[in-house]
Amino acid sequence: MEDKQKICALLLPALQATRELHDLAGLEYDAECELVIATFNSDYKRVANVAADSGVAMIRDILRQIT
């Protein structure tokens, strides 16, 4: 079983280093709902559905759904 919160924690600094997502403040995995909540410095939030995803598929879905 993959640790999806750990994947989010490791992905966050890589995304913050990009021009497009430099203002991303956090990625929080909600295991009960299988969602990732992306919070930006402006308090704006985007939600990515990562239900039944592997770790790599989760990263793809986060990128697709928050950008």
Image (cartoon, rainbow, N blue to C red):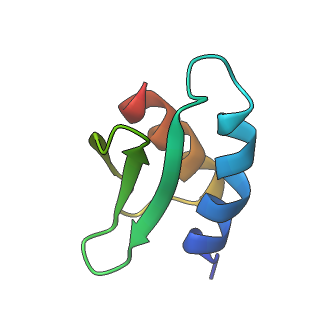
Task: Please name whichever residue, 64 or 26, is drawn nearer the observer in this view of the structure.
Answer: 26
Direction from residue 33 to residue 67 in the image, left or right: right
Q: Is the residue 1 above or below the residue 18 in the image? A: below
Direction from residue 8 to residue 26 in the image, left or right: left
Q: Position of residue 31 (x, y in %)?
A: 37, 78
Residue found at the very far front of the displayed protein: 42
Q: Position of residue 10 (x, y in %)?
A: 73, 59
Residue placed at 59% from the left, 60% from the top? 8
Direction from residue 60 to residue 65 in the image, left or right: left
Task: Please name whichever residue, 15 or 63, is drawn nearer the observer in this view of the structure.
Answer: 15
Q: Position of residue 35 (x, y in %)?
A: 32, 61
Task: Please name whichever residue, 31 or 13, is drawn nearer the observer in this view of the structure.
Answer: 13
Q: Is the residue 35 above or below the residue 61 in the image? A: below
Q: Quadrant of residue 60?
A: top right
Residue placed at 57% from the left, 18% from the top? 20
Residue placed at 66% from the left, 37% from the top? 16
Q: Quadrant of residue 6?
A: bottom right
Residue placed at 28% from the left, 39% from the top? 44
Q: Is the residue 62 above or below the residue 9 in the image? A: above
Q: Quadrant of the C terminus?
A: top left
